[in-house]
Amino acid sequence: MPESSTLNEIIQKYGGDREALVEILRDVSQVAGYVTPENIATIAQRLGLPQSQVHSVASFYSLVNLKPRGKHVIRFCQDAPCHVAGGREIWKTLEQTLGIPFGATTPDGTWTLLTTSCIGACSVGPVMMVDDEIYGNLTPEKVQEIIAQYRAGGGA
Ligand code: FES
């Protein structure tokens, strides 16, 4: 987050309360896209907490990003019901189509590929989310079509 004033505002919004650490980290992540090491140092100092503690809390929560994310974030469900419905094929297709492994972002900053646990759409597994949109009954062909649509600027 380049503007420390924004970070200060977020910390102040929660009254500098260390009990609000998770909310502060989540807000910073939402506003700035991700939380930098400098942000962690500032938050730790302002809340009177060790940096290691702030970092470990930030690492634990999936709503807190510690790395820049791509323009579109794919979250692929890796839980068992989706896996047995053909998730393995989809996993490979996603990595091959985007040319990156899970956990990575494409060099052009367009795509980030992540896993998620069950999102409650098991009946139409395998399932993935692209940003806030859920796609089910995935096949390798369908995955390629969806990605092509986004690449063409069509989005969901
Ligand atoms: S296991 Fe994939 S949505 Fe539930």
Image: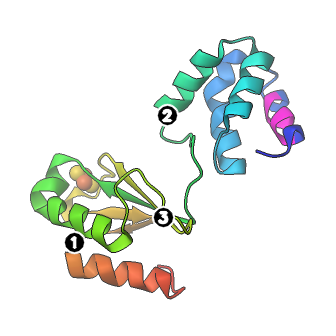
Which amino acid type is shown beneath numbered disc 3?
Thr
State which tag comes first along the sequence, 3 or 1.
Answer: 3
Position of residue 21 measured from the top left corner of the image (x, y, whole percent):
65, 24
* Label disc, if present, on residue 106 of the rendered structure: 3
Q: Quadrant of the N terminus?
A: top right
- 117 sits to left or right of 27: left
- 3 sits to left or right of 153: right
Position of residue 103 measured from the top left corner of the image (x, y, whole percent):
40, 50
Which amino acid type is shown beneath numbered disc 1?
Asn
User: Is 138 colored magenta in this rendering?
Assistant: no
Q: Secondary structure at mark 1?
A: loop
Magenta span covers which residues?
A: 6-11
Which amino acid type is shown beneath numbered disc 2?
Tyr
Residue name at image x 81 percent, y 37 percent:
7
Q: Secondary structure at mark 2?
A: loop
Residue name at image x 58 percent, y 16 percent:
53
Read off the residue under disc 1: 137
Position of residue 13 measured from the top left corner of the image (x, y, whole percent):
82, 32
**Magenta highlight: main SS:** helix
Farthest residue, direction left: 84
Residue name at image x 19 percent, y 56 percent:
82
Residue name at image x 51 percent, y 80 percent:
155
